[in-house]
Amino acid sequence: MSDSVKISYKEKEFTYPVIEGTMGDIAVDISTLRSDTGLITLDEGFKNTGSTESSVTFLDGDKGQLLYRGYSIDELAENATFTEVMYLLLYGELPTASQLDSFNKELQENCTVNQGVKDMVNAFPTTAHPMSMVGAISFTLSSFYPEVGEVKTPEEFDKAAMILLAKFPALCAMAYRRTNSLPINLADPSLDYVSNFYQLMFKNDQNIEISPSIVSALNKLLILHADHEQNCSAATVRVVGSSQAGLSASIAAGVAALWGPLHGGANQAVIEMLEDIKKDGSGLQFWVDKAKDKTHAFRLMGFGHRVYKNFDPRAKIIKQATDEVLAQLGIKDDVLDLAKGLEEVALQDEYFVKRNLYPNVDFYSGIIYRALGIPKEMFTVMFALGRLPGWIAQWKELRIDKQAIGRPRQVYIGAKTRSYVSLDKR
């Protein structure tokens, strides 16, 4: 394989090095293209553009492979806790027993939030979307905890990351409680990370029983969402961080990017689609036929993936967890029954199989969140809770490498130079 690429332009030839990643992905380093030739590349949506070298996450869409720091998502979801994966993403290695114990203790010690944050949450109208609250609180968190603002040293990073990771479950739960006009719960430092989040969400006057199957399912969901290479929100966190914006401000930008229905809002769209199908009453096959009709605008949400060409490796894992939780909780729900029926059709119908339109992680995560009593307005918040350690790891990598400020170029197609015309002559 050649270790360089040659470009000919205006009777001149320019040579650019080829870079190969540790897993075999190949890139052409064109960082001097514009200064050499006056050319830029045009790649709308950056689908063919590598913005960075990264050691956090590897994704192979053709093989359906996802690795965090070299570890298979299958093994991590089966064997690790979410806090282990947090540590792995932030520090590059799985923690030892003593490191994990210390990490968990720090999370427990920092899990409470001060009254000012609670007052801010209670100032929102109960009609506010939970993501708007989480985004706003994330952005202003440095006002209450200056440590999550400017971060310059490894020690300052450790402190800022810990504050964000420890307090974010409370922020997410407070948004849920506010939209339901419920009083804010206090964090319980005696509980593990996931169990504490669950009681922050759902504990009322009496003690709450936290089922091991629910904790296991939530651990898997959060692990599966923890990072996903240079996706829209991770790229946003990195670009904002490249301006040397603080950690909390960069994370807030990630929250905003995640809110879009083409990114983190897809699992909410799945449940809304199923609710519409149920309300319509025309039957599942009617809508399946509509999905096959290329002339019709209707599309099945939660099927296929922009990156994975065969199957989403996360979907296989969460499908099993979904089946287990539904069986253990004995839940009967017409919408969930519709989802299972739709899943069966997609896995057997030649139209879907031929096009690799298999249920993805958004399809199953929406089902399991609904089964756990989490409303659809909170689905993207749950995604943000899982993605937080990945965002922080991406931000850390960018700042350590001291990458230049993100500044894409463009091909201008507007009006040519023209003179100002006074108002009375227009």
Image: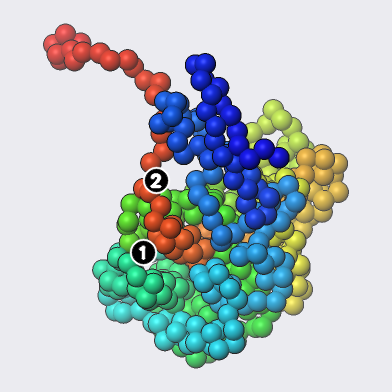
Outermost residue, top side: 425
Task: Give the Cα distance between marks 1 and 2.
Answer: 18 Å
Asked whether residue 372 is in view, the answer is: no
Rendering coords of residue 334 (x, y %): 71, 60
The three-letter amino acid code for the residue at tag 1 is: Ser
Rendering coords of residue 234 (x, y %): 49, 54
Density class for disc 1 (Cα within 10 Å; few <14, some 14-19, many ≥20) is many
Q: How is the image coloured?
A: rainbow
Is 147 located above or below residue 295 in the figure?
Answer: below
Asked whether residue 420 is in view, the answer is: yes
Question: Does residue 364 appear to the left or right of 236 in the view shown?
Answer: right
- SS at mark 1 in the image: helix
- SS at mark 2 in the image: loop
- Of tags 1 and 2, the one toward the viewer is 2
Question: Does residue 360 appear to the left or right of 104 in the view shown?
Answer: right
User: Which residue, given by chain and number where applicable, does mark 2 sit on?
Assistant: 406
Which label number is shown at residue 42? none
User: Which residue, given by chain and number where applicable, does mark 1 sit on?
Assistant: 248
